[in-house]
Amino acid sequence: MSVIEDKLKEMGIALPPVVKPLAAYVPGVLDGDHVYVSGQIPSVNGVLDYVGHVGDDRTVEEGYAAAKISAINGLAVVKSLIGDLDKVERIVKVVGFVNCAPGFHNQPEVINGASEFLVALFGDKGAHARSAVGMLELPRNALVEVEMIVKVKV
């Protein structure tokens, strides 16, 4: 097992199987030394429990948890393409979309669930550029969607 996967285990996290795409796309693409991860929603064991709108029927804390799950799903995609998460050189960019109520302005705090998890797991290699964007709706009414760009050793 890899160092990163050992650390995941210590955190009580097991990488799930890659979530089947909702439409006509692939979960991720390895191009040279970068993995481009398609938007991941917070599904756990094939169930999307985190649905709704932050700032209406869901809290910032629930959005934070959903963003972390989405990042975990994204790492499952990365592993499926490179075989070993120890090959991750850097989390380059995270883009987080928050399904939120009108007037909600705390998208960064929600997407911190993904960002803080990635930094806790990878240390300095997990620090990344980021966008956190509010959306009127997301696919399947998901609370968040997270995509990543990851530099890897090939």
Image (spheres, rainbow, N blue to C red):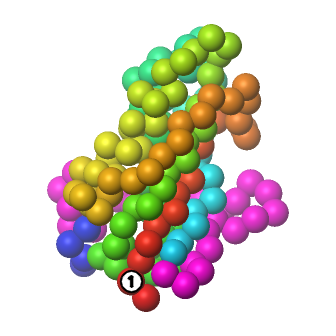
Horizontally, residue 125 falls left or right of residue 95, namely left
Horizontally, residue 9 falls left or right of residue 95, namely left
**Residue at image x 21%, y 67%?**
6
Front-lying residue, 106 or 6: 106
Front-lying residue, 13 or 150: 150
Identity of the amino acid at label 1? Lys
Q: Is residue 12 magenta?
A: yes
Span shown in magenta: 5-33
In which quadrant of the rendered image does the C terminus lie? bottom left
What residue is disc 1 on? 153
**Residue at image x 48%, y 56%?**
93
**Mark 1: few, some, or many residues within 10 Å (few <14, many ≥20)?**
some
Q: Is residue 24 magenta?
A: yes
Residue furthest out toward the bottom: 154
Above or below for 126 versus 86 = above
Is the stretch drawn in magenta largely helix, strand or loop?
loop
In which quadrant of the rendered image does the N terminus lie? bottom left
Q: Where does the image place residue 33, in percent across and percent down from the top left?
A: 49, 81
Report whether residue 137 is seen: yes
**Residue at image x 25%, y 76%?**
2
